[in-house]
Amino acid sequence: MIVAVVVVLLAAIAVFVTQPILVRGPDIPRFDANPESLRAHVVKLARELVPRDLSHPANLDAAAAYVRRMWQEIGIRTEEQSIKPRDVPSAT
């Protein structure tokens, strides 16, 4: 009986510690997505701002700026994190 109580108590503690029961996450604004705007975003990223790899840094920067701008327009706070990639062999 004591073992069962301890197991249930430990399970309850694990759920309480790992699940966001009492803590609210950041407020993310709601927005209405429609098929036309989603298609426009896909076209922009998949057809216009390509290729996006280390040999085309302007396209990487443009895609990042585009995503950042779209998120900011719907109220999502953004933060830039720069990386410095190591020498990556690539086929040219």
Image: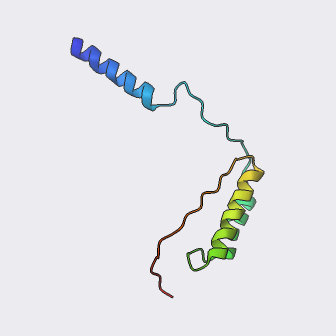
Residue situated in front as seen by the camera: 64 or 4: 64
Q: Quadrant of the N terminus?
A: top left
Q: Is residue 2 left or right of residue 64?
A: left
- Residue 68 pos. (x, y %): 70, 58
Quadrant in the rendering for residue 46: bottom right
Q: Is residue 27 left or right of residue 8?
A: right
Give the residue drawn at x 66%, y 74%. 59
Quadrant in the rendering for residue 37: bottom right
Q: Is residue 77 above or below residue 35?
A: above
Residue situated in front as seen by the camera: 79 or 23: 79
- From this viewpoint, which residue is outermost toward the top? 1
Please count the marks in the image: 0
Q: Is residue 65 left or right of residue 1?
A: right
- Residue 54 pos. (x, y %): 55, 76
- Residue 17 pos. (x, y %): 43, 28
Give the residue drawn at x 47%, y 76%. 87
**Observer able to see residue 37:** yes
**Observer able to see residue 45:** no
Q: Is residue 18 above or below residue 40?
A: above
- Residue 76 pos. (x, y %): 70, 47
Give the residue drawn at x 60%, y 30%. 24
Quadrant in the rendering for residue 42: bottom right
Give the residue drawn at x 62%, y 75%. 57
- From this viewpoint, which residue is outermost toward the right? 73
Q: Is residue 6 above or below residue 30?
A: above
Q: How is the image coloured?
A: rainbow
Residue situated in front as seen by the camera: 43 or 19: 19
